Amino acid sequence: MTPDDVRYDERGLVPAIVQQHDSGEVLMLAWMTRETLAETLAGGETVFWSRSRGQRWHKGETSGNTQHVVAVTADCDGDVVLVQVDQGGAGVACHTGRRSCFHRPVAR
């Protein structure tokens, strides 16, 4: 499968689940375009599409918390990608300074 084979939504985006490769910990969810997915595969570090800024976003470019890509796989429908990484920098994936973006329990 290549970036051209992935199924993007009407905005040209595909959700990317980012997971620490050795522990299985889910670090974050971001969005990719065909171009940022291709750049991620070619460069070995995650590059996303920022929906809020409307521009390319190389994770860690300013913070130093880069994500080194170990593997990228698509789900069975080809409309979600799983990006397994080695979280670099201070080990922080979330803009709040936490390791994972998933730290807020939802009450029942």
Image (cartoon, rainbow, N blue to C red):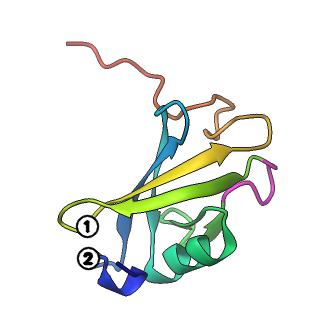
The furthest residue to the bottom: 4
Which image quadrant for residue 97?
top right
Q: Which of marks 1 and 2 is nearer the N terminus?
A: 2
Segment colored magenta: 59-64
Q: What residue type is labelled 2?
A: Arg
Residue tagged by mark 2? 7
Label 1, label 2: how far apart the Cα atoms are: 5 Å
Q: Where is residue 21 in the image (x, y as percent from the top left)?
A: 54, 42
- Pointer 1: residues within 10 angstroms few (<14), some, or many (20+)? some
Number of marks in picture: 2
Tell me if residue 55 can be seen: no
Question: What secondary structure is marked by label 2?
Answer: loop
Q: Where is residue 98 in the image (x, y as percent from the top left)?
A: 64, 28
State if disc 2 and disc 1 touch (CB < 8 Å): yes
Question: What secondary structure is marked by label 1?
Answer: loop
The furthest residue to the top: 108
Q: Residue 79 carries which label?
A: 1
Q: Residue at x 63, y 40 (%)?
A: 93
Report the side of 57 relative to 74 (left or right): right
- Pointer 2: residues within 10 angstroms few (<14), some, or many (20+)? some
Q: Which residue is drawn at 64% across and 33% down?
A: 96
Tell me if residue 68 can be seen: yes
Q: Which amino acid does label 1 sit on?
A: Asp
